Amino acid sequence: MPLNESPGELVQLPNPPPTLPLWGKVLWYVAETVAIGVSWKLFDYGQAINGVKAETGAAEATEWRRFVAHWDDTTSVEAADDQYHSIDVVNYTGGQVDSTWNQADHDYVTAAFLNFVVAIAGSTCSRYACKDVKAYRMAYNDYSFVKPFAESGPPVHAASTNTLGAGGSTIAPQICSTISERTPVRANWGRTYLPTLGSSMVDSGGRLTTACVDALANAYSTLANSLHAQDFFLVVPATSSNRSPVRALQNVTEVAVDNVADVHRSRRHKNQTHRLIIPTPAPLEGVQTLPTA
């Protein structure tokens, strides 16, 4: 990967080997940039990928897949109260990113993701049920586009399920846990907001229980290992670095979960079902008030 180590000096990272170790630090990137600066030193391997170009006749863009799990709030008729979380996955064949996902590829990754869904259901609020997992095409635009990602279009694969949360109820929808997807460059770490926690996952001090934390971290680790067994890799798409636009996929090298609950503000209930407004005492006689508009 041609990146500036110092003015006038270029550094080329070698291509990744055909068999990539799970812990390999890899950068798949759209060229034409000094994207990561000196942080190239953090990577073991690098490989150029194609972005969508404006001109006709250009090489096909390199694709990966985004798998999205949909959790239905069974107590609400509002679709806006449903929740989603996702993973990004690269298909790696013969030492190259493979954009030609077939049915077997989609089935395998979907099955691994559904196993992850089942594993986290024990920590999920019991009023939520995972209804489906869908896969979407993902690709970068070339740097000539303002938007970093190309339009995904409709899902290319879908699988139904009915996995119920089993972690207890009676907790606000915005309270959740997150999984930190650590990559070689910390500024580009990913974060997955899991579905609303079950009430039994929170201890008397307001922290997540140790059992909950360990279960979530182990579930993601199992997912990563299962994917790696068939040369699929979890990645975090980066769109900026050092205040410059970037089109690069960094593979996830570590997973971290802690016992501090997170808040996903956009998951708050959209409509109030009860509100009480009580007037406060009026000014005393003779006390001046501001004029009304």
Image (cartoon, helix red, strand yellow):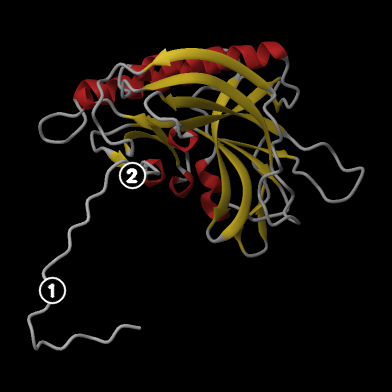
Residue under pointer 2: 272
* Mark 1 vs mark 2, CA separation in Å: 28 Å
| 139 lies above or below 55 | above
Q: Position of residue 127 (x, y in %)?
A: 34, 23
Q: Residue at x 62, y 51 (%)?
A: 246
Q: Residues within 10 Å of mark 1 (few under 14, many from 20)?
A: few
Q: Nearer the viewer, residue 275 or 154?
A: 275
Residue at 45% across, 20% down: 130
Which percent across, then down, holds residue 292? 30, 83
Disc 2 crowd, CA 10 A, few/some/many (<14, 14-19, 20+): few
Please state, as top left, top right, bottom left or bottom right, where the C terminus lies in the image: bottom left
Q: Residue at x 62, y 25 (%)?
A: 135
Q: Disc 1 marks which amino acid?
A: Ala
Helix, strand or loop status at disc 2 = loop
Asked whether the viewer can see residue 18, the reply is: no
Locate residue 152: give its quadrant.
top right
| Type of the residue with mark 2 | Gln
Judging by the rendered image, the residue that carries numbered circle 1 is 282
Task: Judge from the rendering whether residue 123 lies leftward or rightward of residue 129; answer left or right.
Answer: left
